[in-house]
């Protein structure tokens, strides 16, 4: 492994974890001169930045950027701007990885002349592995337009076909690859040549957009079944809180629809391929999901919650996606919400989901 590696770690109020994260990064079995660790302290108030500074004082490979809080996307953009390595790994400050991650994955990229390497990970909770997650790809190397046709769809969302497979009860029909950046190696040159940046307007879904954007720029993408990364589950994480705040989730989905539309235009210009069909099912499924989320009792009145729901379903992109979706055969219980949407009976759907919420029915994909 001859290439220089940059590890970018965005950090916000994770004083109890950042030390282990930096030590794992410094413990990578690559030559010292080939490694730099860039910690971006995103306006932490709990001492995270001071801990990172202590490591920087002891080891010149650690560089700390202190900035006002602007979110993980802005932090990663600053990390990219400061990076000097040929290869970049984006690790989160509360997770950890195997000591041979960088050396093995970078070697794979060099041997395959790959612009990206996708690898597996493990979900880690209560000091033990809860689940091992392998990439669901049939090939170990994708070249040219096959990347946009076969790799990008696995990350960007659900298609209408996926939903219909789910209605028929097919196993893993709604499986989507975790688009987190910590499970992929990228080349800095590809990012710079294509002026790629993380979307700072997104509170969630920024990984989905960036990884799809990046992959569409690649000429060769390698995949390995081996797991290197440990994703630590915490109830205080931003995504955990987001999933439990329906209005925040609604706003996030709206902004993600905006970002996907812009992403689609970029990919068409870049490759000539329209990827809209690859995520059209996600838009439709979200219309059902948000009915359940917003019809549940909360701080706002039912009228306010329904008005918010209709702000999503009346979006022209959602209207178009629902119109183009044709529910196939399958479970009647699963099909009913989609049939209601197809007939424009959103009020009835909202009322029905409120009743199901009242009896503690949990909507599951």
Image: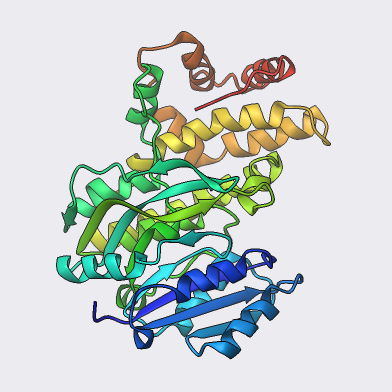
The structure's colour scheme is rainbow
Residue at image location 34% in from the left, 44% down from the top: 134
Which corner quadrant of the image does residue 280 belong to?
top left
Say if 319 sits above or below 334 in the image. below
Quadrant of the drawing holding the N terminus? bottom left
**Which one is nearer the viewer's eye here, 10 or 27?**
27
Count of numbered circles in the view: 0
Residue at image location 50% in from the left, 52% down from the top: 231
**Which one is nearer the viewer's eye here, 284 or 175?**
175
Residue 268, given in percent of the width and then of the height, sits at 29, 56
The answer to whether residue 262 is visible is no
Which corner quadrant of the image does residue 73 belong to?
bottom right
The answer to whether residue 176 is visible is yes
Judge from the rendering whether residue 181 lies leftward or rightward of residue 308; answer left or right.
Answer: left
Say if 137 sits above or below 190 in the image. above
Residue at image location 32% in from the left, 46% down from the top: 135
**Which one is nearer the viewer's eye here, 147 or 66?**
66
**Which one is nearer the viewer's eye here, 320 or 118?**
118
Which corner quadrant of the image does residue 160 belong to?
top left
Residue at image location 34% in from the left, 84% down from the top: 34
Residue 320, given in percent of the width and then of the height, sits at 44, 35
Judge from the rendering whether residue 322 lies leftward or rightward of residue 291; answer left or right.
Answer: left
Judge from the rendering whether residue 315 lies leftward or rightward of residue 121; answer left or right.
Answer: right
Say if 206 sits above or below 90 in the image. above
């Amino acid at each position: 492994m001859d290439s220089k590696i940059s590890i970018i770690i965005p950090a916000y109020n994770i004083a109890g974890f950042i030390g282990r994260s930096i030590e794992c990064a410094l413990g990578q079995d690559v030559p010292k001169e080939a490694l730099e660790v860039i910690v971006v302290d995103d306006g932490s108030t709990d001492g995270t930045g001071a801990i990172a500074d202590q490591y920087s004082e002891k080891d010149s490979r650690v560089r700390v950027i202190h900035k006002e809080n602007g979110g993980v996307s802005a932090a990663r953009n600053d990390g990219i701007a400061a990076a000097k390595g040929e290869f970049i790994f984006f690790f989160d400050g509360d997770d950890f990885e195997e000591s041979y991650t960088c050396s093995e994955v970078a070697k794979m990229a060099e041997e395959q002349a790959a612009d990206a390497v996708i690898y597996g990970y493990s979900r880690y909770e209560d000091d033990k592995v809860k689940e091992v997650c392998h990439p669901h790809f049939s090939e170990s190397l994708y070249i040219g337009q096959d990347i946009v046709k076969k790799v990008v769809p696995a990350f960007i969302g659900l298609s209408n076909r996926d939903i219909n497979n789910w209605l028929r009860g097919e196993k893993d029909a709604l499986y989507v690859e975790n688009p987190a950046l910590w499970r992929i190696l990228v080349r800095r040159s590809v990012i710079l040549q294509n002026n790629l940046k993380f979307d700072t307007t997104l509170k969630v879904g920024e990984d989905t957009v960036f990884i799809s954007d990046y992959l569409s720029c690649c000429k060769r993408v390698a995949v390995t079944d081996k797991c290197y990364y440990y994703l630590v589950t915490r109830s205080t994480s931003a995504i955990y809180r987001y999933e439990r705040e329906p209005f925040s989730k609604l706003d996030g989905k709206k902004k993600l629809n905006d970002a996907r539309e812009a992403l689609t235009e970029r990919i068409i210009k870049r490759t000539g391929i329209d990827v809209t069909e690859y995520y059209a099912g996600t838009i439709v499924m979200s219309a059902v999901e948000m009915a359940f989320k917003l019809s549940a009792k909360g701080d706002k009145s039912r009228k306010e919650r329904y008005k918010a729901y209709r702000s999503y379903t009346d979006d022209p992109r959602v209207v178009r996606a629902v119109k183009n979706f044709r529910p196939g055969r399958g479970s009647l219980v699963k099909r009913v919400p989609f049939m209601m949407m197809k007939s424009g009976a959103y009020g009835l759907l909202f009322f029905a989901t409120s009743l199901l919420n009242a009896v503690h029915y949990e909507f599951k994909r």
